[in-house]
Image (spheres, rainbow, N blue to C red):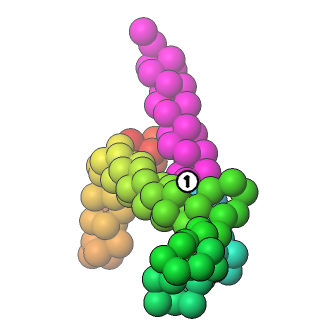
Amino acid sequence: MTIRTRMSRRCALLYGLAVSAAALLLLQAVSGLVLWLAIPRGHGGGDGLGRGAGGLGGFVERTFAGLGRSSWVTLHDWAAIAFVAVVVFHVILHWRWLVRQTRTAFARAGTPIQPEANCGD
């Protein structure tokens, strides 16, 4: 395996992480807007006291795109957990680069700076 092949695989992994993070963030935003605007808390069709629109004790859950509020909350929560996992993995992959950049930012004047590698390090 050559250095170029190894770097290409690393770049592909970083690209996949970036696309995954963007997709999960978009899912978070959409599900958050649905929960906030389309099916807000306390609007299940009843009077807010546990008595639904179906009469005494009945409950009709409002839905959006075929999913009830509890399903949207679950989707929102799992998207958040997955997003955090992707970000943590991304930071782990870039740890050496982050350390070098931090050292460079706080280095004294005249300290030699190492060149960056392709796709982080």
Q: Which percent across, then down, holds residue 64?
A: 70, 63
Q: Considering depth in this image, is 79 or 56 the residue closer to the camera?
A: 56
Furthest residue in direction top, as rendered: 1
Q: Is residue 55 shown left or right of residue 106?
A: right
Q: Which percent across, then down, holds residue 17?
A: 50, 43
Q: Amino acid at mark 1?
A: Leu
State the residue position of label 1: 24
Residue name at image x 46 percent, y 83 percent: 50
Q: Considering depth in this image, is 120 or 105 the residue closer to the camera?
A: 120
Q: Which secondary structure lies at badge 1? A: helix
Residue segment shown in magenta: 1-24
Q: Considering depth in this image, is 57 or 81 the residue closer to the camera?
A: 57
Q: Which percent across, then down, holds residue 88?
A: 34, 53
Quadrant of image for the N terminus: top left
Q: Considering depth in this image, is 87 or 66 the residue closer to the camera?
A: 66
Q: Which percent across, then down, holds residue 121?
A: 38, 42
